Image (cartoon, rainbow, N blue to C red):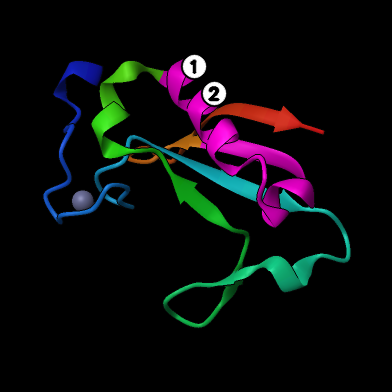
Amino acid sequence: MSQQLPIKCTHGHKVCPECSAYKMVFLLKNGFDYLKETAPGGKKVNPVRYNYVSKNRKGLEYNVTGMLRRFENEVIYKFANVIQFYETESNTLVAEKRF
Ligand SMILES: [Zn+2]
């Protein structure tokens, strides 16, 4: 299956809600709702980030490690108590990091 994943976003982005294989969701600690982000419909949601489409075929572990490293200095990382990783297409939880 992973061989069929695109390694280039057809929309011209490096990370993409449609083309990235994985997404990470930051579940924020109590009291940090102000760090939530605004979804297109205006709803406040937990911050979501996507892996680089170019790394789609590198597998889960590679991408989890890379994404954790990419965001480890960000405020949302500091104030998350759980970070969940999902396969974007199936919306299946595939990994979880608890602090
Ligand atoms: Zn795309």
Q: Mark 1 = which residue? A: 61
Magenta segment: does it hold 66? yes
Q: Residues in magenta?
A: 60-85
User: Which image quarter: residue 52?
Assistant: top left
The quarter of the image holding the N terminus is top left
Residue at left offset 31%, top offset 41%: 20
Determine the main secondary structure of the stretch shown in magenta.
Answer: helix
Residue at left offset 23%, top offset 53%: 13
Residue 27's place in the image compared with 85, above or below, is: below
Judged left or right of residue 57, residue 25 is right
Q: Residues within 10 Å of mark 2 (few under 14, many from 20)?
A: few
Which disc is residue 65 wearing?
A: 2
- Asked whether the residues under the numbered discs 2 and 1 touch, taking CB atoms below 8 Å apart as contact, a structural biologist would say yes
Q: Amino acid at mark 2?
A: Thr
Residue 47's place in the image compared with 92, above or below, is: below
Residue at left offset 82%, top offset 33%: 99
